[in-house]
Each structure stands twice: as C-alpha cells, then as structure tokens.
Image (cartoon, rainbow, N blue to C red):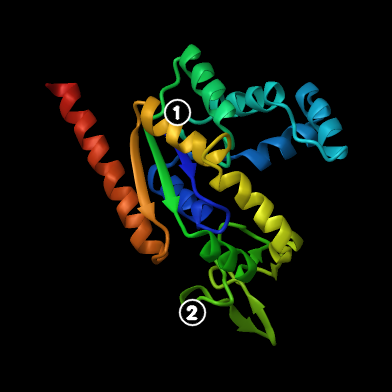
Amino acid sequence: MRILAFGPNGSGKGTQGTIIKERYGLDHIESGAIFRHHIKAGTELGVKAKAYIDEGNLVPDDLTIPMVVEALSKSNDRGWILDGFPRSLEQAKVLQETLREKKIHIDYIFEIKLDREEAKRRIMGRRICAIDNNHPNHIAIAALHPVEKDGELVCRVCGGRLSMREDDQDEDAINQRHDIYYDEISCTMAAVNFYKENSGARFISVEGDRGISEIAEEILSEIEEGEAIKLRQRFN
C-alpha cells in the first residue's frame, strides 16, 4: 500500500500518518527526515543538499526527488506513507513520472482540508514532544491539552518533555509556509489538484476541523473500502 498525505501545516497530517502507519505496518516517510538522513550520512546527495540549505536556498528538485525515490524504494514490503512532499506542481509531475518509470503505483492520496486561520491558530498553540513529534499536544484544545507533572506541562501521550518550535510563534514564517501550501497555481494545492485529475489513485478528502479519531475513522474507512474493491477485482 502506497499513500501520499497532504494537509496544511497545523492540520494534523503527521498524526493521521502515524495512525495509518500503525494500522497497516507502513513506513512513514517524511521529507525533512530524508534530508537529515542524507546530510548526517554524508552521502553525495546530502553534501550537495547541505550546500544549498546552508546558504538559505531551496534544494533543487533534481537533488530532492532522487532522495525521496530512494527512500520509497527502500521501504518495507507493506508499503509507505509519503508526508511533506511534493510541495509544488512541478515536483508532483516529476515524482509521478519517476514512480511510473520504476513501476511504483500510488494507491491512496488523502487531503486534510483546514481553514488557513484555524491552521495558524493550531500551529501557535501546539507543543512538540521530545520523544515523538507526532504525539498531539495543544494548549488551546482541551482534548489535546498537555498534562501537568512536577509543575510543568508534559506530553499527554507519553510524558515526554515539551517544547515550541521557534517558527511556530513567528506569524511571518507561518504565513510563508501557508502561502506555499494554499497556492493553487504552482505550489502545493496545485500539486493536490494535479493528483486528483491524473494519479489514478483513490482520492480521500476530509475536513480537518474535527477530532483526531473522527478524521482517522473517515480516512481508514475509505482505505478499507478501497482495499475491499481491489480484493473483489482480483478474484473476479
């Protein structure tokens, strides 16, 4: 099973990816982690990518896409969820063509839809767990509020230390990230629309202004239905 995950920063996309990963035993592949791996390992791609990052520039697609495809190719037999990539229409087109050449088929694409202002509010209130950054903690949402221990707020899931990302409190940085995501001309939403029309995968679109379990139930239900259809087709 191979899945692409889309959603604006703050939508809970990573949390849903973790739920799906655990349900089906998939690899959860995040674009940021791929860069960190290659840079830490000192690979040829990592060295080239670091030079761009150190200068504050975006890593070109001809470096980024090979890193992503390599990670997907090395995933376990059960499959993967790709989270955080592609971020542009051009990346989506090149990635799709590269996967087709390697005969890698995308089965499902899910999109979490969320109002831009609500996404910003969620970003500024979220707290990051040192043990697992996909553990949801949020100071403004009662169901996700961290717990207090020895006078400090800790992760509601595992008790890990909590912190804030600096750019989560920087409205200009948040707006810049969201400008990229919500752009329907050349950036992430353009990529989402491209996949809707061209991927052949089952497309799952869910409203993100609900609880984690509700969103997860809808996504998982769509995947289960898709798997049931594939099974019937196989034996017909």
Q: Position of residue 99 (x, y in %)?
A: 50, 20
Name the image quarter holding the C terminus.
top left
Helix, strand or loop at disc 1?
loop
Image quadrant assignment for residue 129:
bottom right
> Which residue sits at x=58%, y=42%?
84
39 or 97, nearer to the observer:
97
Residue under numbered circle 2? 142
According to the image, label 1 marks what residue?
A: 77
Asked whether residue 1 is in view, the answer is no
Determine the CA span between mark 2 and mark 1. 39 Å
Residue type marked 1? Asp
Pinpoint residue 136: horizontal percent, then vertical percent: 54, 65
The 10 Å Cα crowd at callout 2, few under 14, some 14 to 19, many 20 or more, is few
Q: Where's the N terminus, which quadrant?
A: top left
- Tell me the element at label 2: helix
- Tell me: 35 left or right of 26: right
**Callout 2 touching callout 1 (CB < 8 Å):** no
Residue depicted at 72% across the width and 27% down the height = 60
* Mark 2 or 1, nearer chain start: 1
Percent x, y for residue 5?
Answer: 47, 42
Vertical comparison of 97 with 200: above or below: above
